[in-house]
Image: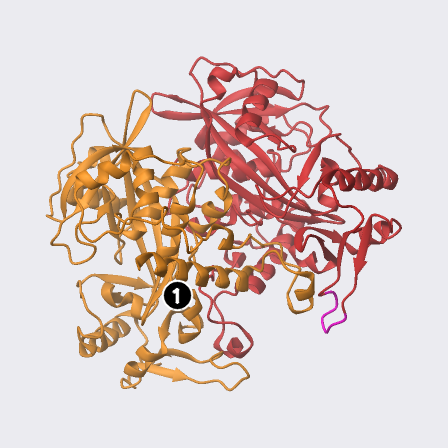
Chain colours: A orange, B red
Amino acid sequence: MAFNTYTLSLRFRASFLSLNNSSPISPSLLPNTRLKFSQRPPPLRQFIRPSSSSSSSSVSASSFTWDDVFKIAHSKNDSSDLHGFFDKITTCNRGSDKQHEFIPFIINDQIVGYVHEGFAAHLKKFHDVFVFHQNNCHSHHAGNHVTLHPMLVTAEERTTAVADVVKRLGAELIPGTRNELYPVTSSFGTSVFFSLERAAAPYFGIKAYGVHMNGYVERAGKKYLWIGKRSERKQTYPGMLDHLVAGGLPHGIACGDNIVKECEEEAGIPSSISMEAIPVGAVSYMDIDGYRYKRDVLFCYDLKLPEGFIPENQDGEVESFKLIPVADVANVIKKTEYFKPNCNLVIMDFLFRHGFIRPEQFGYLKLLQSLRSGDCS
Amino acid sequence: MAFNTYTLSLRFRASFLSLNNSSPISPSLLPNTRLKFSQRPPPLRQFIRPSSSSSSSSVSASSFTWDDVFKIAHSKNDSSDLHGFFDKITTCNRGSDKQHEFIPFIINDQIVGYVHEGFAAHLKKFHDVFVFHQNNCHSHHAGNHVTLHPMLVTAEERTTAVADVVKRLGAELIPGTRNELYPVTSSFGTSVFFSLERAAAPYFGIKAYGVHMNGYVERAGKKYLWIGKRSERKQTYPGMLDHLVAGGLPHGIACGDNIVKECEEEAGIPSSISMEAIPVGAVSYMDIDGYRYKRDVLFCYDLKLPEGFIPENQDGEVESFKLIPVADVANVIKKTEYFKPNCNLVIMDFLFRHGFIRPEQFGYLKLLQSLRSGDCS
């Protein structure tokens, strides 16, 4: 059943890609397509598993132990087959066929988010905070958008007014409040228009940024990753596998400072070591699920740890850590859904940069590109 | 003068980006734009140098010595300013506003290249090799395309027939024949429809692949790059700076094997060392210059060399090599046009992966993305 869902969402993804980027095109279709663009990656279609295949489907998460992880880590692996990696891209990038159900959220002429029609219906009650604009034109929704009331001028006024709306909408509509504020911007590093409760971010489709760190060790030329298993008591993704260190990027803290802070809290890594963490790039994804539109960008870090270092969780969010050969971690990613979904992308980025995925494997460039399937800005 | 050209081409690039990806959009424009896509990076516009600025313009190439390189390498550097890097992206991605002058080159329903209208006029003489299709529709060129004559069925027949055309067109139209064949495909690793002389590749707008390697050394925790200076006798980019090792990827050789071969030829690196080169990703660009449409993808490799290793060029194509601190190399890239243009991208990719460009620098994500401005497939 889980497998059927995968196949389906892969198909949606593929049709979305072919809409945006075109692809190998039949000459009979030419008059209706814009042919002059050079950005024509091949469609993901060629990487979709045949729906009859069963042997290659992922092992689903639910509940598992470290023993389950190690059994799969050491199982037979066809290193040339990248399908298992493509599946993980798909898991993080659902619902692109549902984009037409959202209207842009605009502040100062810039798109800062997207709001679902159904969620918008709830916001319409708050006339003094949200203003809806309807434009008449041929297409169904083009031109419709939501913005903040012009009386809300300063970031503080906006933050307070929207926080009040989120509170009044209640936990039934927006569950899991964290009391952590995310900046609302059109892209990273540009003006912050206001701040929004982290749990509400996907309901407003705002960009959310995080820092994720792969902690690794090198022994006799072989690389090992420190992998965490999340506490069963965690609100999100309990019991699943995770990086050594990861966290959202709240308003007002720089990426590098946040990594040092999270290193201490999540793995007991002193700043004398975590200062050596290297920023190595970013991954992105866009995921639509009901009213939620996630547009996440994760800044990736590598930290090479001393061989003897043993991480110790300080905040109770991690059950335990294990040091696992990188090739085995790759096998677990390909064959299971044990990792928290977005961690798969950050580890795949590590696999690319450290040569564990190679140009000789069919689909190399497509997979590399799809690590930034979302708006990476 | 050179600086004016830069500013101009940056503007073209920016307007192309805003056409394709949209960007911060004025609500007054909404009815005519497709708003539902999430892939909306900010325009490059914000990174364009003001045309009145003179202090920050690049030092042009022409002729320079290692002394010139070192003087600039050690000069004052505002590390937060990424403009010099964006300039190098622009240099490799010219003429996107000229895409309408090209028609697709299609084989077996797949786009394998693009041919300029002017170049197409020359090809039309060869009825037995090239067939032109015209479709009537509203847009000027949509639907027009060129394909190979249906009598040319096998890859060999196509290769021979097109080679004959290239030969008959002569060196005046297609200069610099290398007697090296590139595979013609729609994307990397898929069916090869035929092979084409390397020098002719941009005239047919086919995808061209290369392997580029950054050779580096680590001394007391500090990283140094081995940089080559091309021979003044080289046909292309004489006297300019280059990687330790780089080369085109001809038909029939795998990336990894090609790197080992090029390591030996270009820098005298024995296979016992070059086998350790790590594939770390890819960069891409698309560059239109007259009839030429380059759609290049470069597979990037890192090789950590022993401290004592001294590269020695074997094929006469490199004048000399120098070992330079990575931060100094970054300064040279930002402030000069001394490097062969596409090498800048591969070194910038290295700077990202090794933490020499950081999320705290404004424009980080935009620059990261623009390293794959071309069709990276």
**Residue A103 at x, y = what percent?**
41, 75
Question: In the rendered view, does B132 fall on the left or right side of B39?
Answer: right
Image quadrant occupied by the C terminus of chain A: bottom left
**Residue A92 at x, y = what percent?**
35, 56
- Please state which of residues B123 and B97 is positioned toward the viewer in this rendering: B123
Q: Does any portion of residue A74 appear in the rendered image?
A: yes
Q: Is residue A44 magenta?
A: no
Q: Does any portion of residue A189 appear in the rendered image?
A: no
What secondary structure prevails in the magenta region? Answer: loop
- Please state which of residues B358 and A221 is positioned toward the viewer in this rendering: A221
Res B336 quadrant in image: top right
The residue that label 1 is drawn on is A95
**Residue B277 at x, y = what percent?**
47, 26
- Please state which of residues A15 and A146 is positioned toward the viewer in this rendering: A15
Which residue is painted at 58% across and 64% down in the image? B19
Q: Chain of mark 1?
A: A
Label 1: how many residues lie within 10 Å, few (<14), some (14-19) or many (20+)? many
Instruction: Please tell me whether residue B248 is drawn above or below residue A105 in the rendered image.
Output: above
Count of labels shown?
Answer: 1
Image quadrant occupied by the N terminus of chain A: bottom left
Q: Is residue B138 magenta?
A: yes
Which residue is painted at 35% across and 49% down in the image? A57
The part of the chain drawn in magenta is: B136-141
**The disc labelled 1 sits on which kind of residue?**
Gly
Question: In the rendered view, does B204 fall on the left or right side of A66?
Answer: right
Question: In the rendered view, does A309 fall on the left or right side of B142?
Answer: left
Q: Give the secondary structure at mark 1.
A: loop
